Image (cartoon, rainbow, N blue to C red):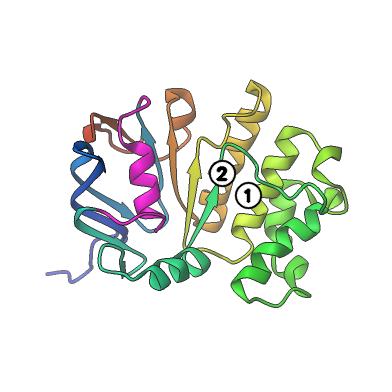
C-alpha cells in the first residue's frame, strides 16, 4: 500500500464557526454568523458578496485588524482570536500584507520610497530591496517607474506599486480588498492578471474580496457570502 500523502497543501487560513457581533448601544449586528473556511497555502481565493454580506469583516479579521467575537481563526499558525494586540500587529508586519481599492501611496514619495516604507516598518534592510524584489518588479512592469511619484503615474501603475509594496516583506498571505475598484476595465484586467501571475509563478497565497463575479473568476476558487454566511462555495475552475 502506498504511503504517499495527499497533494492538497495544509491550510494557511483556517476559520471555524467564526462569528462577529458589533454593538452600538443596545443594538447588536451579527456581521458573521458561523463561517467555516480553509484556504490552502498557495491558493488564490475570491470571496464575493454584496455590501453588508460580511466579506469586509472577514477580511479585517483574517488580517488581524479586528478580533472575532467567537470561533477560531488560525492565520499563518497564529490564533488570531486569542492573540494580543501586539501579536496581531506582528502578524500584519510579518505574515499578511494588504492591497486596497485606494492605492494609499504617500504622494510626496517616489514609487521606490513608497515600497521602502514597508521594509522600514518591518525592520528589514532597505539597501537590498531592488535585488530581492527584482522578479516581482519585472513581473509587475514598474522597474522603470521607481523614481516617479504617484501623480506621475496612471491608476494602474499606482496599484502595481501598491502590490509591490505589499510584497516587499515577502508575506505568506496577500489580502486584496476590491483591488480594481478604482480602475477602468483595461487596468482592472491587467491588475487581475498580475495577481494570477503572482500566484502561479511565485506560489503567493491570495485572498481577494470583491463584489464582481468577473474579477472573482481570476482566482482558483470562489466562495459567495450573504448575511454573514458562506452560501455557495465553488470548486476550482
Query: Which of the image's four quarters has the C terminus?
Result: top left
- Image quadrant assignment for residue 165: bottom right
Nearest to the observer: residue 34 or residue 208: 34
Q: Residues within 10 Å of mark 2 (few under 14, many from 20)?
A: many
Mark 2 lies on a secondary structure that is helix
**Segment tinted magenta in the rendering:** 50-68
Residue at x 76% of width, y 46% of height: 141
| Marking on residue 163 | 1
Q: Nearer the viewer, residue 97 or 151?
A: 151
Secondary structure, mark 1, is: helix
In the picture, the disc for residue 195 is 2
Pointer 1 local density, CA inside 10 Å: few below 14, some 14–19, many at least 20: many
- Please tell me which of labels 2 and 1 falls first in the chain: 1
Residue 8 seen anywhere in this rendered image of the structure: no
Q: Position of residue 103 (x, y in %)?
A: 65, 42
Please tell me which residue is depicted at 78% across the width and 60% down the height of the picture: 113
Say if the magenta span includes residue 198.
Answer: no
Amino acid at each position: 500500500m502506498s504511503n504517499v500523502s495527499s497533494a492538497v497543501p495544509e491550510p494557511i487560513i483556517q476559520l471555524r464557526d467564526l462569528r462577529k457581533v458589533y454593538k452600538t448601544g443596545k443594538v447588536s449586528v451579527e456581521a458573521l454568523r458561523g463561517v467555516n473556511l480553509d484556504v490552502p497555502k498557495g491558493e488564490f481565493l475570491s470571496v464575493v458578496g454584496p455590501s453588508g454580506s460580511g466579506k469586509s469583516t472577514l477580511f479585517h479579521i483574517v488580517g488581524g485588524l479586528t478580533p472575532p467575537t467567537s470561533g477560531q481563526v488560525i492565520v499563518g499558525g497564529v490564533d488570531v482570536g486569542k492573540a494580543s494586540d501586539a501579536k496581531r500587529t506582528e502578524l500584519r508586519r510579518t505574515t499578511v500584507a494588504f492591497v486596497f481599492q485606494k492605492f494609499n501611496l504617500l504622494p510626496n514619495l517616489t514609487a521606490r520610497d513608497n515600497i521602502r516604507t514597508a521594509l522600514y516598518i518591518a525592520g528589514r534592510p532597505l539597501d537590498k530591496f531592488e535585488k530581492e524584489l527584482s522578479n516581482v518588479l519585472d513581473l509587475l512592469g514598474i522597474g522603470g517607474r521607481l523614481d516617479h511619484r504617484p501623480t506621475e503615474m496612471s491608476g494602474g501603475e499606482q496599484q502595481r506599486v501598491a502590490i509591490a509594496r505589499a510584497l516587499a516583506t515577502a508575506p505568506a498571505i496577500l489580502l486584496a480588498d476590491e483591488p480594481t475598484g478604482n480602475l477602468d476595465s483595461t487596468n482592472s484586467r491587467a491588475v487581475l492578471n498580475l495577481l494570477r501571475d503572482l500566484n502561479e509563478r511565485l506560489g503567493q497565497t491570495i485572498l481577494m474580496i470583491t463584489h464582481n463575479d468577473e474579477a472573482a473568476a481570476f482566482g482558483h476558487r470562489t466562495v459567495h457570502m450573504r448575511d454573514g454566511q458562506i452560501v455557495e462555495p465553488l470548486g476550482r475552475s
